[in-house]
Amino acid sequence: MDIGKIRNFSIIAHIDHGKSTLADRILLQTGLVTEREFRSQFLDDMELERERGITIKAHPVTAPFRSRDGETYQINFIDTPGHVDFSYEVSRSLAACEGVLLVVDASQGIEAQTVANTYLALNHNLAIIPVVNKIDLPSAMPEAVRDELVAFLGVPPGEVRYASAKTGEGVVEILESIVKGIPPPAGRPARPFRGLIFDSVYDDYRGVITYLRVMDGEVKRGDRVEMLASGRVYEITELGIFAPGMKPAKTLSAGQVGFVAGNLKDIRAVKIGDTLAAAGSGAEPLPGYTEPKSMVYCGLYPSASENFESLRKALDRLALNDASLNYAPESSSALGHGFRCGFLGLLHMEIVQERLERESDLDLVKTAPNVTYEVIRTDGSAAEARSPADVPDPSLVAEIREPIVRLEVMIPKEYIGAVMTLAEERRGSHKGLEYIGGRRALLHYEIPFAEIVFDFYDKLKGSTRGYGTMDYEFLSYRPADLVKVDILIHGQPVDALSFLCLREKCEARGRRILTRLRREIPRHMFQVALQAAVGARVVARENISPFRKNVLAKCYGGDVTRKRKLLEKQREGKRRMRAIGNVTVPQNAFLSVLEAREDE
């Protein structure tokens, strides 16, 4: 294929602004999919993607398009995820393109992820074609949204395209803008082969299938290639393009997007963003590659202990198609054997849990999610704390550092005060305020990740009547006055309930947990002490009163010493029982506390 006739692009948009519908319409318009074959959200082949209306995995497509000038172009479209949890994958997919369609809902306007993904595109020096979608809606305000885009991007009004992906209106004009406004790839066909890996999947029969954009040279069956980050060398046994299913091809040359497969069975050897090059060519790796870093951790336990091996097999199976998921076995005195799992964010965590339960028919118990902290010991060494159990004794800790994120909140301007109050309550540091198009405001904050990871988004929606949207990006670890709080039941620490929080809030949070536990744990024959402790210091306590037999019922008179003797004998029995007794804590008590902590 002539490299001058290739156009590589992606679509960036906020959730529910019509990205998948526009992708469907492009497939129909180019004739790649017939009306008979078509179904809504054609590229979203995962059940969860179709239910939630979001894209979780990248879906590339190669389609022919005959322009009005009589030329036939090869359009390579990469349908990327839109959620902030997958921003690294989006960044690598954009690195495989020369341009993007920036899609904005005509009734909603610019929102937080629109801004974040636009900045990603600008960082890659991509051509941006702004599109106002859903112009057929009764509530559409295409001119007002166009003015927002003009102010935000600094483009002439005439460059903004109008479309209705649902009806097909304006789609041909968008395709014409792609071939005219997006430059052809700048690859060098004469150089040794080099390509960018932007995704991968695992097939039981073919092994690892790698999605790549060829930057230089060409690759064909039988070639030996090397992944520069992992150093793995293997032979190509199959390659092709997506049309939209996998279609074999003889070669892939500079500028094209396709897939390669070989005798490779370990998906963890394939790193998104890595460079695939001809073995022994000494090629330089493409810039931008980093290891994906888990930001949120939680424990996953089977509700029935005999399902532990089933959970292990389910995680192994899921990890074959999700290299960003990491997990390790752990045990809890309260919940038994399970796994400590690392995720890119809260959505990633929800998706993994739901897939495990659906695809493997498991009933799972999830501990409260927590972020990763850096612990500096008194000897100067640093360690990563993925759970409160990883934090050593306070006497060995010199400093605890928490993750800070850059938060961007897009809201109608009348809600600025409410959102600023919410952010300041969560220890946010205000960094800037911009007005976009006269109707919307963009707030910039630096805020601890732990403060937004649970319910910040729900509170934001409540404060702005559903109109607020947010996006965040990890910045750095910074020192904070944090302490580890242990929850003790009858003198025994319960690892599943321990947590990290600000020193000034440890008593209040500990007491909330103890109060709920006191309601959930049944009474015993002896008094049960519930305590929240920081190191050796108890900061909160609640007691569960014991069952008590009325030993004086048989005393109908006589000397008071007889009553005292019976009460003393009962007291001694309770003391002895308390010393040797075990507290039975039902699992629903732990679950109710974990749910309560997510709601705090």
Image: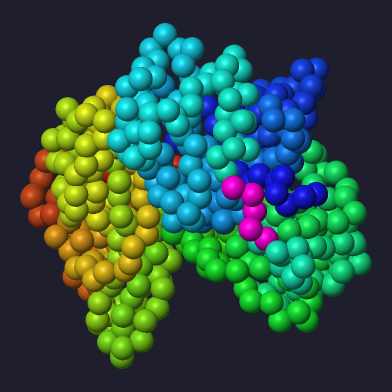
Q: Quadrant of residue 568?
A: bottom left
Q: Residue furthest left?
A: 560
- In this figure, which colouring scheme has been used for the structure? rainbow
Q: Residue at x 76, y 79 (%)?
A: 281
Q: Residue at x 25, y 56 (%)?
A: 446
User: Can you give x and y, in whole percent of width and height, for residue 245 in the image?
Assistant: 80, 39
Q: Is residue 172 magenta?
A: no
Q: Main secondary structure of the magenta part?
A: loop
Could you tell whether 96 is left or right of 507 in the image?
A: right
Residue 355 appearing in the image = no
Q: Nearer the viewer, residue 73 or 419?
A: 73
Report the magenta residues as a range: 183-187
Could you tell whether 44 is left or right of 580 in the image?
A: right
User: Can you give x and y, in whole percent of width and height, for residue 581 in the image?
Assistant: 38, 61
User: Can you give x and y, in whole percent of width and height, for residue 69 in the image?
Assistant: 69, 30
Q: Residue at x 55, y 68 (%)?
A: 287
Q: Is residue 573 above or below residue 18?
A: below
Q: Residue furthest bottom?
A: 379
Q: Nearer the viewer, residue 512 or 259?
A: 259
User: Can you give x and y, in whole percent of width and height, for residue 388 in the image?
Assistant: 37, 65
Q: Quadrant of the C terminus?
A: top left
Could you tell whether 388 is left or right of 424 in the image?
A: right
